[in-house]
Image (cartoon, rainbow, N blue to C red):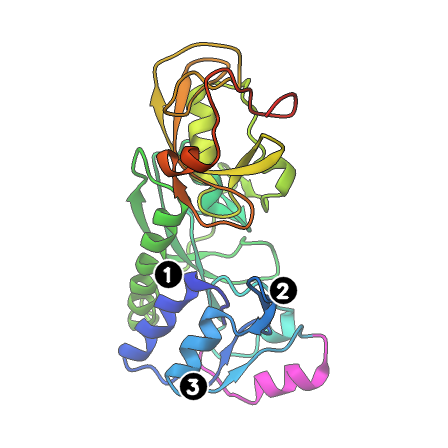
Amino acid sequence: MGTPDFAVPALTALVAAGHEIACVYCQPPRPAGRGHRTRPSPVQACAEGLGLPVRHPPHFRDPGVRADFAALDADVAVVAAYGLILPPAILGAPRRGCLNIHASLLPRWRGAAPIHRAIMAGDAQTGVCIMQMEAGLDTGPVLLRRETPIGPRETTGALHDRLAELGAQAIVEALEQLDTLHAVPQPAEGTSYAAKIDRAEARVDWSGPASGIDRHIRGLSPSPGAWTEARGERLKLLDCTPAEGTGAPGIVLDERLTIACGAGALRILSAQRPGRGPMLAGDLLRGFPLPPGTILGADGG
């Protein structure tokens, strides 16, 4: 049970390990891209390519949908970034319950955006937990955890891919050892919640220190993307590096797109204009000049 790219390595690893996949559940196909054509999710595309049966109910409120799930007579359900709430009738249907691949070291970063939040908060390490699901939000006991350091310049995109592979390895290992693993309740202390990123929060506040803005940009790259106003456009900032320089927050300091922050400065390495693909800063500036003295943000740009 999964929907986005994060869940694909787990599905392929389960198949490669010889597990019988009774059915694959994912969210329904949705319009995507410039043409807004309906596209299957990455998990659906992968499952169909493997010849696996796929179901994508919009919810589990329908008694018939719940009955169809129970009729699979599954030993266990593996859940990875599925995106739908599982009611008690679904959680209790498989003989061994539902096991979730969660991309954090629980109880830190329960919720929707654990990878983004870990980088934005400056965490030195993260990992994956295989958790026995229960009715609460990521509150179930942990069967297995695997840790990994967060690189000093790592983006959410890069860390997402590493954790997806780590989660795939961990769920195969957990299923192999399911009869001997002990579910460990999560400690009460150290709980934090990884709320979904909204568009307003993604906006860069140049009055903050460069270190925090650096984590903000890397933590939101490539999606949803930290953004600032530039020449009346919303410019998405995808990569950056600490730089020397001082000035009013948000002002462009040089021809290399170094931006002054409340303390310190950052050089933007890649960015994306609306309706365009990602570009290196040098390529961006050739067609979209931002000369020294330009002020980025709500009061200028």
Which element carries disc 2, helix, strand or loop?
loop
Which of these two is toward me, 261 or 234? 234
**Point 46% across, 69% down: residue:** 42
Q: Is residue 53 above or below residue 278?
A: below
Q: State the residue position of label 3.
A: 52
Query: Which of pointers 2 and 1 lies earlier in the amino acid sequence?
Result: 2
Please provide the residue range marked out in magenta.
61-77
Which element carries disc 3, helix, strand or loop?
loop
Q: State the residue position of label 2.
A: 85
The residue under label 2 is which amino acid type? Ile
Residue 275 in sight: yes
Q: Residues within 10 Å of mark 1 (few under 14, many from 20)?
A: few
Side of 248 where 105 appears, left or right: left
> Separation of disc 2 and disc 3 at Cα?
23 Å
Residue 183 lies within the magenta run: no
Q: Is residue 64 above or below residue 287?
A: below
Question: Please, which residue is most extreme toward the right here?
Answer: 62
The residue under label 1 is which amino acid type? His
> Separation of disc 3 and disc 1 at Cα?
31 Å
Query: Which of pointers 3 and 1 lies earlier in the amino acid sequence?
Result: 3
Q: State the residue position of label 1.
A: 182
The residue under label 3 is which amino acid type? Leu
Q: Is residue 57 above or below residue 119?
A: below
> Separation of disc 2 and disc 1 at Cα?
25 Å
Residue 74 lies within the magenta run: yes
Which mark identifies residue 212?
none
Say if mark 2 contacts mark 3, CB within 8 Å.
no
Quadrant of residue 234 within the rendered picture: top right
Q: Mark 3 or mark 1: which is in front?
A: 3
Query: Which of pointers 2 and 3 lies earlier in the amino acid sequence?
Result: 3
Q: Is residue 264 above or below residue 129?
A: above
Image x and y of residue 93, in percent = 56, 79
